[in-house]
Structures are given as structure tokens and as C-alpha cells.
Image (cartoon, coloured by chain):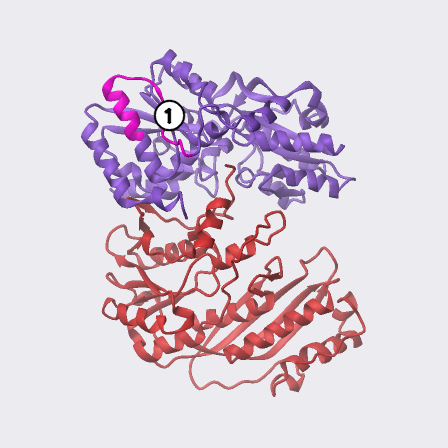
């Protein structure tokens, strides 16, 4: 993809003025990158037609640093929303894309972000159909914030709701936890440590579709445990369903380097953010087949059943520890803070 | 992960739990000194696996928990004066008398969370027109790095760096606990990381004087159950010695290079402990030749006082006299989202550890 270089090194307030500079930025960087019949109308919005019920999800992305090992804020903004739409049991189709840019962002960086957005959108087979670009004064943002809203058609066989979760259902994870959060952490100012940990940001929509094609209503629930980590999502589910959740520490998939980084920084991987991870809660009778199907896909190659829904300890998540003890897994309170020693 | 997975081994841990069960005949109260050990006990569900006769009492070894309220108010005052305040992570959510450092940051204070005080010296060099203060809290474990930052700043002529010191020492706290008229502790698990720095020579006279077993213990499940087993064996045999369960890390003489750095910068002085009060000779203060690095005198905040919340029984919890769930505010007015006292903030604090990992189970029984 060739984006014509603007006559500026960095974005300034003029690019958000709505005048010629804005037009220049839109034409030379945004419209020509995402060119499609909807966007090429250059209208205030787009008109789209759906044949089935639609799922809508919105998310804002404020990650720092904006470039990290394994990705950048751009692909995160696509994958995050694509995955949220998919978690509703839908096939993502369209995205809106809005930027809040702090003046001074390098044009080169912005271009790299746009390219990543384009690539991620193409990979997920979604189209950017409307958007917005604002520029704020230095100090009033953090380089760039992105908001995306996703629209998807609900899969005809899907029935995803906490109402469907019942005692005995199995909880299955597609991959290893805590990778994204630790990749970001390893590059945060003041915390830089050398590691090969890369973010697991990726689109999960095709794996979700495969699962729904095959298992339909026996899949009771999907959720991607992004911010707050696995523990926060499980705690929320336990509260919603009025039953308990039991998980097994020795089943939790976690890559060795990620586990070691968590140990060093004093962080609990259960509370660390994920990106390319989702959990599904399914009929016990299909659990093995679900794991098998997932493992055939690169995005589910580490799939594993981590626990089940129980009648006991209603509203709570309990984890059987490595040594056979039990502990409550509570939701994240505030930010997870590194311990002193 | 060598030295981790082995110490989380199910079979080995189980075998020590069985040995404890076989050995114990009387009820013993064992205090684990360090908050990291409390965390390990509850996080791994060990408390429920121990025989009823072995009762663990959670000690005062959480640096966040024992840092006096007035010190937090002093750090907040510095932030509000425009000073860049650098701190370890779990200190920032501890409530001061009016607000926490985190809230002061939200109001515009320049607060930085660091893993090493040496980074604060770098920040000082990068911001020559600003004053930078490191909130130097902790036990003997963090003292060497904090001392090193002062040495480094002095060596490099960094004049805009200073530290707000609240260093406390483990042995005087153990003595204060043993001298308390309500003390009912039969043995201690010594704090492994503190002893990695200081060694355990100073615990020998303590053990003799109070006729109490002290087992220097690590933090993984196997460490903890082995340490408890060693303490139970001594108690059942009527012995009182200092033993070292954590020999893979702790040497009798400690880390002499680290001790040298500490003694170059700090000397022993009186310190206030949150919830416990002042204990003579229980902490470190900067030596006179390093007074230029003392933030309290540099910014004139020594006089700030702060009353404790009268509903909080943190002092009794820290001395092992009350369990967190015996507090009327536990899980009600006081929870990690709104901590009344420091032990509810840090994950090492006994109250937070119970709240997060354990007490909800107790309430279900």
C-alpha cells in the first residue's frame, strides 16, 4: 500500500481544523488506505443493509506505548472490536474508526498505524465504513487514542447468553493467558526488561464462526478476558449466573517466559490483560470435541478445559491450587500494583 | 522454572503436610513474620490444609501496612508542593488521613511508580529543575537499594534527589510482639528475604531470650509447609533454636556487600509503626553525613501528624492478636476498594489476603 507523504513530519492542530489540512490528511492517508464503496462516498455516514439481527460493540484504545512487541494500537483497535462482536455470536462485517490524535504525533507513526489497521481489517474481512479524526493540543492526549465500533450479523445457530450457562458446563480457553499484558509491561518506561514476550493480539472471529457452525446452541457463552484478566471475567460470570465456578491452577495455560515475568514483577497472571484469548462455556458432552476443533486452528492450538460450573459456592470463583488447596479468585480491584518486595 | 515449580510440587507438599499431621500433638500458634508468606499461605490454600492444631498467626511484615499514616501524608504534601514523588507500586493506594497518593496524582501530582530507587536518581538527572523524592519504605530487604540510590546521587553530584525514609527492622518488631502482654505465639517463621540480606545471627539471642523457635522460611508452598514442619518439630521436642529452611537463598552472615551499603548510609533509630506505635531502635534513619538527602528536613514536613481511623484494628491484626475477619469493618466498610487501614491495601496485607483469597470461603461454610 502506498500512502503519499504529506508535507509535514507530524500531525498538528491544523489537521483537525476541518479545513484543507484535514481534507489533505483524510484524502492522502485515510481514504486511500481504506478505500471501499462505503467510504468513497465521503459522506457523513454510511448506509448498510443486514439480513439478520445485528450485534454492535464499541471500544476505545488508549494503550501506551502505542507500538509494542507483536503489534500496535491500530491492529489492537481492529482486533479488539472484531473479537467483541464475535463474542456475541456474530460475524463481524463493518467497523467505524475514530481517532483522537495529540498534536506532534509523527506522520510516519500514524501511517504505520493506518497500515496495521488496514491489514487487520482485511485479515478479519471487515470494512471500515465511517470514521472521525480529531486533533488535541499537546498534553491533552497520549499520542493517539482510537475508538472503533463494530457491526456484525448474528450467526443463525448462535444463542450466546449467560442465561444458558448451567451447572456441569465446561469452561474452555483457546490459548495462553497474560501474554498481551506482559508484552506491554515489558516495554513500559521504567520497567523495560528484555524478553521475547510478544502481544497475542489477533482476530478470533473465524474460530468463533467454526465453533458455531459445528456446535450451534451447545455453545452457551463466549467472552474475551481482556482488561482485568481471566479472573475478572470469571468473577463477573459467577455473579451473573448465581452458580459457582471451579477452575484448576494446574490446567491454566501460561507460557514459561510470561509466568517468569509475572513472578519477577509480582503480578498475578490471572489479572493480567489478554488480547487473543477467549473462553467458551459449553455443554459438558461436547467439551472434548470443542477442544479438539480449537486445537486444529492456530489460534486455538493451546486450547484446554480449565474448569466447570458448580452448584457450590454460588457467585464465587474458586481455584484448586497446585498443591490441592483452595482459594477464592476475586475480581481485580483498581489497577494491579506491583508489590514492594 | 527451576526453583519455582519444584517448590510448588503437589506430592512433596502433601508429604510435608502429612508429616506435620503425624508430628503435632498439641495446639501451636506459629507466626509467619513476612507478608509475602501470608500471601503464599492464603493464595495456595495452605491454611485449610493444615491440621487444626497448627494455627498460623499473621505477622507485621508487610512494609506497606506498617508505614505510618503521617508518612503518607508527608509524601502527599510533597506531591502537592510540586515535587516528583517516586514510589513502589503498592504504596500508592494506601489511604493517608485525607487521600491516597493515587488520588493526589489524579489531582495533578507527578507520581511515578518504580521498581528500583536507582531509576529515581535517573529521573532527578533528567529533571534538573525539579525536586525528586523516593518514598523509601520497607524492611531490611529494600534498604540496600534505597541506600545505593543515595550513594549514587552523592557520587554523581545529584542535588535535587532525596528520600522520604520509613525503614523498619524485623527483630525489634518481633521483640515488641513477644513483650506484648497478650502475646500467645509459640514459634516464628522468619522472613526469608529479610534474612537473605541480614543473615540470621541476630535471631539467635532472640530465640534464646524468649525460648522460642525461629525457622527462617521461604515463600513457595513447599517452603512454607517445610518451615511449619520444622517449627512444629522443635515445639513438640521442647527445643528453641534458629533453623534455616531457606538455605538455598539465606546465608547465616547474610549478604555482606548489601549490609555494607546499608551501614554506610543508615544508622539505627526510633521508628513509628502503623498500628503498633513507636518502637525504640526499630528502624533506619539517614546518617548525618547524608542529611542533605533527607526529604523530611529538606522540605520541612517533619511535623505533619495524622490520626488513625478509630474503626480500624490494624494494630491488633499486625500483632497477631486478632484475625482480619474478627474486625467489625472487615468486608463491610473496609474492603480493597475502600481500605480503612493499610493491611487491606497491599496484597501482602493480612486483611487483603483474607479478603481476596480466603475469607469468602470461610463465610460460605
The quarter holding residue B118 reads top right
Q: Residue at x 24, y 42 (%)?
A: B365
For disc 1, the marked residue is B320
Q: How many tags in the picture?
A: 1
Up the image or down, B28 lies above or below B91; here it is: above
Whether residue B49 sits left or right of residue A232 in the image: it is: left
x and y, in percent, of residue B270 in the image: 56, 17
x and y, in percent, of residue B159 in the image: 76, 32
The quarter holding residue A139 reads bottom right
Q: Residue at x 43, y 16 (%)?
A: B175
Up the image or down, B89 lies above or below B288; here it is: below
Whether residue B332 is visible, yes or no, is no
Q: Which of A276 and A145 lies nearest the eye of the viewer?
A: A276
Whether residue A77 sits left or right of residue B302 in the image: it is: left
Magenta range: B228-248
Q: Residue at x 59, y 28 (%)?
A: B71
Q: Residue B230 magenta-drawn?
A: yes
Secondary structure beneath dot 1 equals loop
Up the image or down, B232 lies above or below A315; here it is: above
**Chain identifier of the residue bearing label 1 in the image:** B
Q: Residue at x 60, y 39 (%)?
A: B116
Q: Residue B82 magenta-drawn?
A: no
Q: Quadrant of the image for the N terminus of chain A?
A: bottom right
Chain B in the picture: what colour?
A: purple
x and y, in percent, of residue B287 in the image: 65, 20
Q: Which of A46 and A234 lies nearest the eye of the viewer?
A: A234
Q: Which of B351 and A242 lies nearest the eye of the viewer?
A: B351
The chain assigned the colour red in the figure is A
Whether residue B113 sits left or right of residue A200 in the image: it is: right
x and y, in percent, of residue A13 in the image: 77, 65
Whether residue B307 sits left or right of residue B45 in the image: it is: right
Amino acid at each position: 500500500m502506498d500512502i503519499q507523504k504529506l508535507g509535514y513530519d507530524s500531525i498538528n492542530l491544523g489537521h483537525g481544523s476541518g479545513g484543507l489540512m484535514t481534507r489533505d490528511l483524510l484524502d492522502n492517508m485515510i481514504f486511500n488506505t481504506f478505500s471501499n464503496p462505503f467510504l468513497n462516498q465521503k459522506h457523513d455516514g454510511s448506509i448498510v443493509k443486514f439480513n439478520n439481527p445485528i450485534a454492535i460493540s464499541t471500544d476505545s484504545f488508549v494503550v501506551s506505548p502505542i507500538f509494542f512487541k507483536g503489534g500496535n494500537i491500530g491492529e489492537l483497535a481492529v482486533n479488539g472490536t472484531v473479537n467483541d462482536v464475535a463474542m456475541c455470536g456474530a460475524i463481524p462485517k463493518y467497523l467505524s474508526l475514530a481517532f483522537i490524535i495529540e498534536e506532534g504525533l509523527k506522520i510516519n507513526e500514524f501511517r504505520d498505524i493506518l497500515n496495521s489497521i488496514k491489514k487487520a481489517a482485511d485479515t478479519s474481512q471487515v470494512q471500515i465504513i465511517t470514521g472521525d479524526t480529531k486533533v488535541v493540543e499537546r498534553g491533552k492526549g497520549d499520542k493517539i487514542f482510537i475508538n472503533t465500533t463494530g457491526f456484525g450479523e448474528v450467526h443463525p445457530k448462535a444463542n450466546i447468553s449467560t442465561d444458558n450457562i448451567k451447572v456441569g458446563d465446561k469452561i474452555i480457553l483457546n490459548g495462553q493467558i497474560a501474554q498481551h499484558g506482559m508484552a506491554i509491561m515489558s516495554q513500559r518506561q521504567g520497567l523495560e526488561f528484555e524478553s521475547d514476550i510478544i502481544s497475542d493480539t489477533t482476530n478470533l472471529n473465524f474460530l468463533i464462526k467454526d465453533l458455531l457452525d459445528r456446535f450451534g446452541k451447545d455453545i452457551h457463552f463466549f467472552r474475551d478476558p481482556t482488561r482485568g484478566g481471566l479472573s475478572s471475567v470469571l468473577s463477573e460470570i459467577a455473579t451473573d449466573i448465581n452458580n459457582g465456578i471451579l477452575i484448576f491452577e494446574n490446567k491454566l495455560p501460561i507460557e514459561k517466559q510470561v509466568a517468569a515475568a509475572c513472578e519477577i514483577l509480582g503480578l498475578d497472571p490471572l489479572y493480567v490483560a489478554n488480547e487473543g484469548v477467549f473462553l467458551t462455556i459449553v455443554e459438558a458432552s461436547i467439551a472434548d470435541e470443542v477442544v479438539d476443533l480449537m486445537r486444529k486452528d492456530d489460534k486455538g492450538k493451546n486450547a484446554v478445559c480449565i474448569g466447570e460450573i458448580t452448584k457450590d459456592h454460588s457467585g464465587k470463583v474458586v481455584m484448586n491450587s497446585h498443591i490441592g488447596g483452595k482459594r477464592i479468585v476475586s475480581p481485580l480491584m483498581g489497577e494491579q500494583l506491583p508489590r514492594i518486595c | 522454572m527451576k526453583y519455582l515449580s519444584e517448590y510448588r510440587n503437589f506430592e512433596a507438599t502433601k508429604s510435608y503436610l502429612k508429616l506435620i499431621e503425624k508430628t503435632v500433638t498439641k495446639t501451636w500458634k506459629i507466626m509467619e513474620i513476612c507478608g509475602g508468606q501470608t500471601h503464599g499461605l492464603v493464595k495456595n490454600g495452605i491454611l485449610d490444609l493444615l491440621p487444626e492444631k497448627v494455627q498460623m498467626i499473621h505477622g507485621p511484615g508487610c512494609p506497606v501496612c506498617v508505614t505510618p499514616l503521617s508518612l503518607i501524608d508527608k509524601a502527599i504534601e510533597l506531591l502537592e508542593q510540586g515535587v516528583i514523588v517516586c514510589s513502589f507500586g503498592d504504596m500508592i493506594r494506601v489511604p493517608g488521613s485525607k487521600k491516597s497518593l493515587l488520588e493526589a496524582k489524579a489531582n495533578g501530582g507527578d507520581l511515578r511508580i518504580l521498581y528500583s530507587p536507582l531509576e529515581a536518581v535517573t529521573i532527578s538527572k533528567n529533571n534538573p529543575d525539579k525536586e525528586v523524592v523516593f518514598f523509601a519504605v520497607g524492611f531490611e530487604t529494600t534498604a540496600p537499594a534505597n541506600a545505593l540510590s543515595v550513594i549514587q546521587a552523592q557520587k554523581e553530584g545529584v542535588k535535587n534527589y532525596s528520600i522520604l525514609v520509613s525503614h523498619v527492622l524485623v527483630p525489634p518488631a518481633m521483640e515488641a510482639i513477644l513483650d506484648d502482654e497478650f502475646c500467645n505465639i509459640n514459634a516464628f517463621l522468619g522472613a526469608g528475604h529479610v534474612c537473605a540480606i541480614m543473615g540470621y545471627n541476630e535471631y539467635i539471642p532472640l530465640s534464646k531470650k524468649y525460648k522460642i523457635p525461629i525457622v527462617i522460611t521461604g515463600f513457595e508452598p513447599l517452603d512454607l509447609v517445610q518451615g511449619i514442619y520444622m517449627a512444629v518439630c522443635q515445639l513438640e521436642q521442647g527445643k528453641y533454636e534458629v533453623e534455616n529452611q531457606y538455605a538455598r537463598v539465606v546465608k547465616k552472615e547474610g549478604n555482606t556487600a548489601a549490609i555494607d551499603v546499608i551501614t554506610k548510609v543508615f544508622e539505627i533509630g526510633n521508628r513509628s509503626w502503623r498500628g503498633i506505635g513507636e518502637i525504640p531502635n526499630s528502624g533506619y534513619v539517614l546518617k548525618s553525613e547524608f542529611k542533605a538527602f533527607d526529604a523530611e528536613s529538606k522540605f520541612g514536613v517533619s511535623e505533619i501528624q495524622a490520626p488513625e481511623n478509630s474503626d480500624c484494628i490494624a494494630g491488633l491484626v499486625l500483632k497477631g492478636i486478632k484475625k482480619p475477619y474478627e474486625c467489625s469493618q472487615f468486608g463491610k466498610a473496609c474492603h480493597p476498594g475502600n481500605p480503612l487501614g493499610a493491611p487491606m491495601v497491599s496484597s501482602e496485607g493480612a486483611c487483603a489476603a483474607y479478603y481476596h483469597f480466603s475469607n469468602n470461603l470461610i463465610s460460605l461454610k
